[in-house]
Image (cartoon, grey):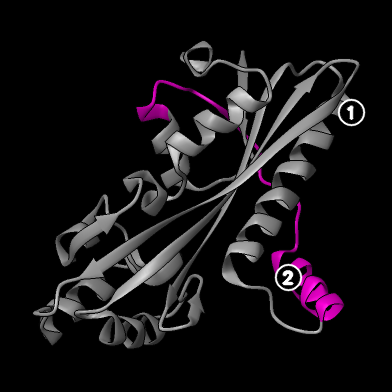
C-alpha cells in the first residue's frame, strides 16, 4: 500500500518515517491565502481556526489526490494537513521574520495556547473515485514562564521558529521551552498520527499495512 504526503513539511515527513512509513511527497498546488480569503468572503467573516485548518488540509490533499488519480497508476493513501496556533483568541501561522517570532514568544512566555491541526486522507485507486475522510486534532501547549530575553534571542537567531506554525517546535530546539502538552504530542509536531490512523481505517486501510 503506497502513501503520498501532500506536503513538503520536513516535520510531517519525519513523523511518518518514525511511524514506519516511507511516503512519496508531492507539493500541493494550492494558494492557501486565496482559499482562506474566498471562504471568509463567502461567510462574511473569518473562519474559526479549526474550520480553516480543515479547509486547507482538504484543499491540499484533494489537489494531490486528483493529480495522482488522473495518472491512473497510484494505489494507496494521500495525506494532507494544515496547522495553526491559537493564543488568546488570535490565530498564528508561520512568523517568517525574526521580529514577529520574537514578539510572539514574548506573548507566549508562561501562557497556554491551542495547536489546531486539520487532516484529510484520500483513498486513491485506479478506476475508482477517491474516497475522503477528515478530522481536526487539537492539543494545548504551555510555555515556560522563566524564558529570559537572551534565551529567546538565541532561539529566534537559530532560525527554527521562523517557518513553523506558532513559531515553535516541540521535537527540536523549542522543546526545552515547553512545560506541558495536553493531547496527542504528534499534533504539535505537525500531524496527529493517531488521527491519521483512524482516518485510514475509515477509508478501508489498516494502519499496519502502510508500514514500509
In the rendered image, the vertical position of residue 46 relative to residue 124, given as above or below: below
Badge 2 density bin: few <14, some 14–19, many ≥20, Cα 10 Å = some
Is residue 67 or residue 143 the one in the foreground?
A: 143
Closer to the eye: label 2 or 1? 2
- Please tell me the numbered disc located at residue 183: none
Helix, strand or loop at disc 2?
A: helix
User: Which residue is label 2 attached to?
Assistant: 36
- Rendered-image quadrant of the N terminus: top right
Q: Residue visible at 17% across and 66% down?
A: 177
Helix, strand or loop at disc 1?
A: helix
Q: Residue visible at 37% across and 54% down?
A: 188
Is 171 magenta? The answer is no
Spatial distance from mark 2 to mark 1, Cα to Cα? 26 Å
Circles 2, 1 touching at the beta carbon (< 8 Å):
no
* Residue 209 in picture, x, y percent from top left: 53, 11
- Please tell me the numbered disc located at residue 70: 1
Is 28 magenta? The answer is yes
Badge 1 density bin: few <14, some 14–19, many ≥20, Cα 10 Å = few
Q: Quadrant of residue 5?
A: top right
* Residue 210 in picture, x, y percent from top left: 52, 16
Q: Which segment is the magenta one?
A: 17-43
Q: Quadrant of residue 2?
A: top right
Amino acid at each position: 500500500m503506497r502513501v503520498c504526503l501532500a506536503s513538503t513539511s520536513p516535520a510531517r515527513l519525519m513523523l511518518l518515517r518514525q511511524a514506519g512509513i516511507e511516503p512519496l511527497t508531492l507539493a500541493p498546488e494550492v494558494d492557501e491565502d486565496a482559499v482562506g480569503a474566498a471562504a471568509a468572503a463567502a461567510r462574511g467573516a473569518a473562519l474559526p481556526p479549526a474550520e480553516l485548518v480543515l479547509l486547507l488540509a482538504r484543499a491540499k490533499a484533494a489537489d494531490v489526490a486528483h493529480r495522482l488519480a488522473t495518472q491512473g497508476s497510484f494505489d494507496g493513501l494521500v495525506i494532507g494537513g494544515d496547522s495553526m496556533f491559537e493564543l488568546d483568541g488570535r490565530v498564528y501561522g508561520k512568523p517568517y521574520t525574526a521580529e514577529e517570532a520574537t514578539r510572539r514568544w514574548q506573548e507566549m512566555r508562561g501562557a497556554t495556547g491551542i495547536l489546531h491541526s486539520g487532516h484529510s486522507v484520500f483513498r486513491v485507486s485506479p478506476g475508482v473515485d477517491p474516497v475522503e475522510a477528515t478530522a481536526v486534532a487539537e492539543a494545548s501547549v504551555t510555555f515556560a514562564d522563566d524564558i529570559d530575553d537572551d534565551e529567546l534571542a538565541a532561539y529566534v537567531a537559530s532560525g527554527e521558529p521562523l517557518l513553523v506554525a506558532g513559531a515553535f517546535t516541540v521535537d527540536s530546539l523549542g522543546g526545552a521551552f515547553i512545560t506541558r502538552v495536553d493531547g496527542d504530542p504528534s499534533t504539535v509536531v505537525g500531524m496527529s498520527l493517531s488521527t491519521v490512523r483512524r482516518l485510514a481505517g475509515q477509508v478501508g486501510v489498516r494502519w499496519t499495512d502502510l508500514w514500509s
